[in-house]
Amino acid sequence: QVQLVESGGGLVQAGGSLRLTCAASGRTFSSVATGWFRQAPGKEREFVAATSWTGGNVNYADSVKGRFTISRDNAKNTVYLQMNSLKPEDTAVYYCARRSGNNSPAVREDAYAYWGQGTQVTVSS
């Protein structure tokens, strides 16, 4: 089993920045992809970004391209999501997710086996 814990959420004004952290523990020795998803109130959960184990293959949702950056530090079993130029529409609970046995940074949430509990990001206008 793998446990994921997100942190770094909070309240920020539009145009501001936040960095989310996803710390993995447990059976983390596999070289697999990790992603970030988000769910706004009243909406379905959606893909945000994902990275392969080495970071050489990444995917971003069109809505965050150029503003968000996903990165990872495998020595620390940690994945980051740097969020810049935040907008009110970025307000959501952000979830970290990890694949099992696959290193492709998938955009579908059913491709991910492990999920964190989420961290709230609120962007005020």
Image: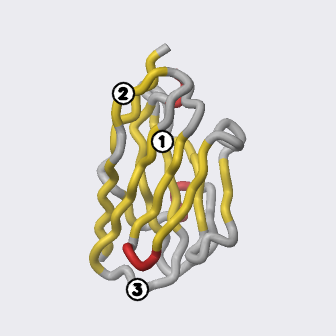
Q: Which mark is residue 29?
A: 3
Q: Earlier in the sequence, mark 3 or mark 1?
A: 3
- Give the residue number, with chain letter if any, for mark 2: 11
Q: Is residue 91 above or below residue 93?
A: above
Question: Which secondary structure lies at badge 2?
Answer: strand
Q: Amino acid at mark 1?
A: Arg
Q: Earlier in the sequence, mark 2 or mark 3?
A: 2
Q: Quadrant of residue 52?
A: bottom right
Q: Residue at x 69, y 68 (%)?
A: 57
Residue 1, image x and y in percent?
Answer: 30, 76
- Give the residue number, with chain letter if any, for mark 1: 38
Camera-side mark, 2 or 3: 2
Q: Are marks 2 and 1 in contact (CB under 8 Å)?
A: no
Question: Which secondary structure lies at badge 3?
Answer: loop
Marks 3 and 1, how far apart at CA: 26 Å
> Of all residues shown, which one is farthest toward the top?
125
Q: Amino acid at mark 3?
A: Phe
Mark 3, Cα crowd under 10 Å, few <14 / some 14-19 / many 20+, is few
Camera-side mark, 3 or 1: 3
